[in-house]
Image: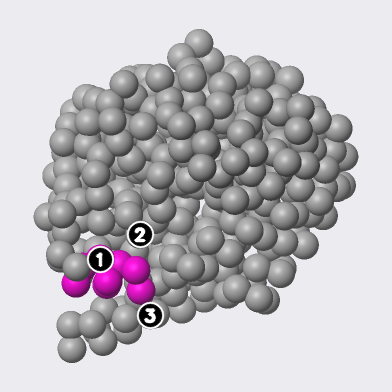
Amino acid sequence: MSQLPEVPATSGDLATFVAGLPKAELHVHHVGSASPRIVAELAARHPDSPVPKDPERLAEYFTFRDFAHFIEVYVSVVSLVQTPEDVRLLTYEVARDMARQQIRYAELTVTPYSFGLRGIPDEGIVEAIEDARVAAARDLGVELRWCFDIPGELGPPAGEGTVRLALEQQPAGLVSFGLGGPEAGWPRALFKPYFDEAIAAGLHSVPHAGESTGPETVWDALTSLRAERIGHGVNAARDPELLAHLAREGVPLEVCPTSNVATGSVPSLAEHPLPRLVEAGVFVTVNTDDPPMFGTDLNREYLVAAELLGLDAAGVAGLARNAVTASFLDPAGKAKLVAEIDAYLAAWVG
């Protein structure tokens, strides 16, 4: 498995610019965003878990042999969230880490079906995330929205359970419906009935596709699941017809460079297809996926993208605008955040 890329040799000035840049994030997993401190705290609450209780040992635990091993480790961390109080703690602390990075808005991918398997009632899950959402906006200036995500490896029962919870509970912050987990062996079309229900109820379709499998999975997500954005989608670069379709239709990709290297989906950062996607005119956003597990954060991913694409401060600000444009934030919220990005850039170059 490839080693994680080093932090790019970007100028200190650009790193400082990125650190202060107002941002939005569209592809970041709820449990996968738990910092080592929070994971260790949850592990201490539930000592029967194999997850280390010492934050120092978590870096070794979060070293992945391949994508299947990543899923195994991820599921072990999910198993630490066993009560509504755990859910609330995790959610609020994720927002706290986002605030430190100047993230103003994030669409957090939540997998409520997995919490339900551990005995947390639907009402408890929704009350916990909504309480944390309101508190994060009030205390931290971070606006959170939810993508309810099907854990694909659990098959149709997970699809049915996820859409049922979404439509029965209807949390105020819920904006979209997703599909995660391993792609191989779980065709996107298998989950079409649940996406049809979610879309009919007004939710946006944002499945993972084309991360650990080829461009055919992206096509399936577009045709079977009516995807409005694609989670990852990097292997679309292998299909010129698909690239042309994505560019023509303006379908955004939620690209997570370090994650792709960490899970072995891309051999190395030098071989990452992000430049080919941009050259083909595909609309891209930059995201973290599961940042503490991959030793990254959104500031670092922006520097990685800047290195790959040869961007200056104005180019990086353009990536920040892309995320706002592709988001499901309301028009007034989008206008406000874009204005903040533009003012920050103007002050920097002025």
Instruction: Tell me the residue that label 2 is attached to.
Output: 299
Label 2, label 3: how far apart the Cα atoms are: 20 Å
Looking at marks 2 and 3 on the same chain, the residue that comes earlier in the sequence is marked by 2
Quadrant position of residue 131: bottom right
Asked if labels 2 and 1 touch by Cβ distance under 8 angstroms, the answer is: yes
Label 1, label 2: how far apart the Cα atoms are: 8 Å
Disc 2 crowd rating (10 Å Cα; few below 14, some 14-19, many 20+) is many
Depth order, front residue of 96/104: 96
Disc 3 crowd rating (10 Å Cα; few below 14, some 14-19, many 20+) is few
Disc 1 crowd rating (10 Å Cα; few below 14, some 14-19, many 20+) is some
Residue 82, position as x, y percentages in the image = 79, 38
Magenta segment: 13-20
Instruction: Tell me the residue that label 1 is attached to.
Output: 15
Residue 157, position as x, y percentages in the image = 73, 20
> Residue drawn 28% across and 26% down?
2
Quadrant position of residue 242: top left
> Residue drawn 35% across and 59% down?
299
Q: Main secondary structure of the magenta part?
A: helix
> Residue drawn 63% across and 58% down?
93
Instruction: Tell me the residue that label 3 is attached to.
Output: 339
Label 1, label 3: how far apart the Cα atoms are: 21 Å
Looking at the rendered structure, the secondary structure element under dot 3 is helix
Residue type marked 1 = Ala
Residue 145, position as x, y percentages in the image = 61, 57
Colour scheme of the rendered structure: one colour
> Is residue 191 positioned above or below 195 on the image?
above
